[in-house]
Amino acid sequence: MNEARSQQTGPLVREGSVRLRDGRRLAYVEAGDLEGTPVIFIHGNPGSRYMRHPDDRLTYDLGVRLITPDRPGYGLSDFQRGRTLLDMPSDIEQLANSLGVGQFAVMGVSAGGPYVAACAYRLGQRLTGAAIVSGAAPFNRSGAVEGVNRDYRTAYALATWPHWLLQPIMTLHDRSVRRRPDRALAAVLEHCSADDRAVLADPLVAAQISGFRNEATRHGVQGMAREARLLTTPWGFPLGDIQVPVHLWYWEGDSIVPQQMGRYLHARIPNTVPHFLPGGGHFSIYTQWKDILTALVRGG
């Protein structure tokens, strides 16, 4: 386990990995107040254990111990063949047990959102709370991509292709992003809201995104390809059986995961706390990081 001071005074960053019952390695990073309230953060796609707000003081000042694992096939976590959404809660629980964590909250952004729903369904009273931030909703429904921009409509459609077709395409795209990250960013900015463009203009945020994005495909795109497929097929559990309170954070300016996805979840998960906000965009987690964590660990 490696432990080092972050760029700010106060917070610590600690990296490690655990061996799961099936022998796979699950890598993680802890940041913020390492003696604080545990929140397990489930990254987006592409993402990795390095995804979080770049200013660890915000997390530290809230007394939050932020634990972010690489999902299977991302970063340093071993690939899991044939995995489903409902496999992830067991990984999360084993990670918590290994770290000596009893109860904890879960928070997930974008493609991490469905895993929060799976954890809320499967782990029940082990959780102190849950938050889905700009999280995708099920796609097997009418109007699933309403409000999604052109590029992401294409991406969601490609995700339904057979693995043998999808993985080579994703490999080529990943090479392109690594070779020309400026061009990849320009493509994202083309469809961004003004608020998102302002977020991405922050050099600390841009550097953080570049870091977790590159780490995501350290060992190739297998994890991403598997996940693209499973997120666009039925989730495999009834949202109506979730009893844990779930905070839902969505912004009007998001054309990657528009608000209609959050409203779909709000209508089907029995106990939700809706935060459907004007303006913003898909990267508003950075501007409202403190509010999201505060609501999750302190209520509100």
Image (cartoon, grey):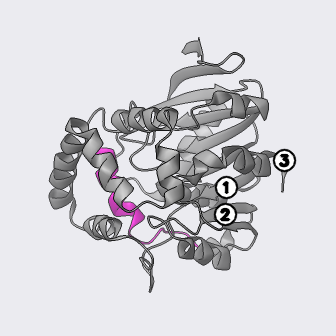
Q: Is residue 23 above or below residue 89?
A: above
Q: Residue at x 74, y 66 (%)?
A: 243
Q: Earlier in the sequence, mark 2 or mark 3?
A: 2
Q: Quadrant of residue 4?
A: top right
Q: Which residue is mark 1?
A: 131
Q: Nearer the viewer, residue 110 or 231?
A: 110
* Left or right of 174, for residue 60: right
Which numbered tag is attached to residue 248? 2
Q: Which residue is mark 3?
A: 298
Residue 68, image x and y in percent? 56, 36
Q: Is residue 86 visible?
A: no
Residue 211, image x and y in percent? 41, 32
In the image, the segment drawn in magenta is: 222-238
Amino acid type of disc 2?
Leu
What separation in Å lies between label 1 and label 2 (alpha carbons)? 6 Å
Judging from the image, what secondary structure is the residue with disc 3 in? helix
Asked if the magenta segment contains residue 147, the reply would be: no
